[in-house]
Image (cartoon, coloured by chain):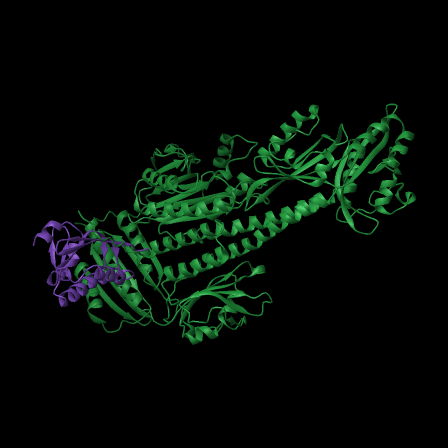
Chain colours: A purple, B green
Amino acid sequence: VTSAEVAIERRGGAVVAHLSGEVDMTNSARVRDELLVSVPNDALSLVVDLDGCRYLDSAAIEVLFDLARRLGRRRQELRLVLAQSSPLVRVLTLTDVQSVAGLHETLDAALSQ
Amino acid sequence: MQWRRAHRYRDELTTRARQQAAVADLGQRALAGLPLDELIDQAVAALMRELDTDYVSVLELTGDRRGLSIRAGQGLPDGVIGGMLPPGRDELPGYTLESDQPLLIEDFAAETRFAPSPLQRDLEIASAVAAPIGTPGGRFGVLGASSRSAHRFTADDAHFVQAIANVIGAAAERARTDELVRDSEARFRELADTTPALMWMTDAEGHVTFVNQGWLRFTGRTLDEEIGDTFALSAHPEDRDDLRARWRESVGRRSEFRFEYRLKHHAGGHRWVLEVGTPRFARGEFVGYVGTATDIHERKGMEDALRESEASFRDLADTAPVMIWTTDERGLVTFVNAGWLRYTGTTLEEELGPSWSLGVHPDDAPAVISSWNEKLAAREPWEIEYRLRGKDGDYRWIVDRGVPRYEGGRFAGYVGTAIDIHERKTMEARLREVYEREHTIAETLQRSLLPERLPRIEGLEIAARYLPAGHGAAVGGDWYDALERADGRVALVVGDVVGHGLRAAAIMGQLRNAFRAYGLAEASPAEVMARVNRLVISGEEEAMATVLYLVLDRETGEVSFASAGHPPPLVLTSDGPEFLEGGRAVPVGAAEPGIFREATAVLPPGASLLLYTDGLVERRDTPLEQRLGDLAEAAGSGDGPLEALCDSVLARVLGQHVPTDDVALLAVRPRPVATGAMKLALPAEPESLTVLRRRLGRYLHAVEASDDVAYEVLLTVCEAAGNAIEHAYGPVDATFDVEVSFEHGTLVAVVRDRGSWRERRGKHRGRGLKIIEGLMDEVEVTSEPDGTVIRMRRRLAA
């Protein structure tokens, strides 16, 4: 069974979503819905913290693109947190996720920008 | 850090855990005696909430079984509840009534077995789940949920609906039994006060709560004087101590109580009575005794009189109000008294001689004759209860007793007395019937709380057995469970709730859910125990359980475990069996704060692990040490398939012995990882990706791939598999194959499906291929006649 967990906190103008576990085609739609409803209109940005993530597949990457698109329409920004040492970095680079969402080494770095 | 709002994303596993919790919660309410109407409403609400669907309904079969009335529901249009539906088996409701399992209808458009009900047609239902309520012989009705969209439900949802239906069924049965119990208590008192027999009842502590008019007439005392802690006060002073000792022993063991003593008589002095008490149970729990006292004073007198002279005995016998007989030394009847003839309506001539089966109920005659012959040969006292035909042709229960008599030191035959015990036997039978029903209900509830099937856990062979206690014993609260943690380790639980009956079964359900929830959240077994303990202690109900909780790493064989007063797990290796000692603490629910310990061990490759409850190893007549030794010997080195191992362990440990307590047994064995090549054929469905990921993860670990490389290989193979799944058109049971091999530092993966790849659909699929191409050293896609093959190579060396 693929399992993922989303924990949401509000940090000033940003909503921080800590995503942990595994996201693949079986649960990506639900993860996306969960992330979308967590962002109220008055938030300036959504920061998705991927540090607890052990597995993301192309469906999960698609969720990130979709999120960036939808947030963009509401003039909200998507930022990602992932340490450069994570095995996931290469895939994010390969799929060019950075073209729609800034990738930050730490949560503090993502928030301070 | 300020947490304004915390969302918990619920995946499939937590959905199942939540559904289990809903079943346990409803079971608990049923147990607490919530009226059936309210319970049904809450069941409907639980289904609406957990399945998040359009309609839920409860249909009840009418008394004449010719219609299904819509008893309750949610989402239905006004005025529908209270209406009737036809019970024909060509439509879903009627079909479900005759089914012995839940039904899942993914799309009515494709359903050939039956049509939707008229109501479902009106509501334009596309998919549904439905489950029968009640036992096959006593169907109550049908529980169903339906949706206007197709493919709305899963097989797990169908099991969930069945579990809820089982609780409703148990509660409906319970409502009927409650009436029966009330009815039978009332009838008992009515019967008790009109019968000449002496009757009494006690509570679970042995205090007298009721004696009948017959008793009061006999002793000449008042009801107030007899009620309460008055046991044995009316007995002859010389008999009191023995009577009390025997009574305490029986109450302690909840076994039948039987004693002859002298009871105070209103006319002065005492008379001999035979007192028989039967334990009573309600809702599966012991609630006290019901008993009778039979006047056997004449019998006692007869036996004495006969010792004096035969002639004076016959004079006395014919005036006595009991049935009396004598035989010669060969066992032939030489005399029956007037009381006997009045009862049977026979003549003295008919009764004399070898008349042992005369008037005896055909079902009882073989036992009567064989026991008589046996005792006669040994010249021992004989006593048996059987049905004897009266002069009006009806059979009544009597207790017949014969004792050897001697004349001048020479064996002269038997003298016997028979006493009518029909009221007592009838009452016992009725109590037994009520008790049997209770037992069945508790079993139903317990089954609805046990896992329907063990989860399939990749890389782990697993088997389990559950044996309910023998006939007549109250159902226990044993359980087992297995679940896969997010860190890839497997948590195993075996537990035993102290106590029996419905209450224990309901507590078991709650504990099982608590271990599931904390087992997923907490890595340390001792911490899981501590948290469950806190939950139990803070709960309203007093509960205690022995539990063994163990976490297993399938790759390394490392286990860490905590035992709350539970017998130790057994490891089986080629070197023989060995118990895992350590990590021991008091049972859950015994103390707060509970101090729990954990111990660790490493299973050698190929080892099996046995977890069990003490029903398997506890027997009164054998010390525990020896039973553990027997278990270890029976399990041996644990070779062969686990299913067979479970069967042989149970057969060898229990033998012909019927367990007096429930037995749960859970056996697991990590599958060895082959490092040569890995071949898998998996169903073409998204859930297969998880299985593939786990298997491949173990394989990559075994070939010592680094974390980075392992993730990239996992991802590319799963992306290729994702393509295969999306392209699996046509036959419903499509599969795809994965083959992975590792040679000379290079990993080769081949994914083969049975469909043909179509144009890339949108950016998503394009991205998948981009990932595959970007992360693998070589990728080759070939279209073959029966499908598409993708071959990938990746060097693993850094």
Residue nearest the viewer, comparing B597 with B53: B53
Q: In the depicted view, which residue is nearer to us: B490 or B177?
A: B177
Is residue A34 rendered to the left or right of residue B387?
left
Above or below — where is B417 with respect to A35?
Answer: above
**B128 or B192: nearer the eye?**
B192
Depth check: B86 or B722 in front? B86
Rendering coords of residue B99 (x, y %): 52, 64
Residue B203 pos. (x, y %): 58, 38
Residue drawn at 86 percent across, 23 percent down: B409
Residue A52 seen in this snapshot: yes
- Residue B544 at x, y = what percent? 44, 38
Q: In the image, is B558 to the left or to the right of B665?
A: left
Vertical placement of B289 versus B434: above or below? above
Marker count (numbered): 0
**Image quarter for residue A58?**
bottom left
Q: Estimate the x, y position of residue B10 in percent, counting from the top left.
A: 30, 56
Q: Is residue B159 visible?
A: no
Report whether B362 appears left or right of B691. right
On screen, residue B111 above or below B463:
below
**Residue at (56, 35) in percent of width and height:** B205
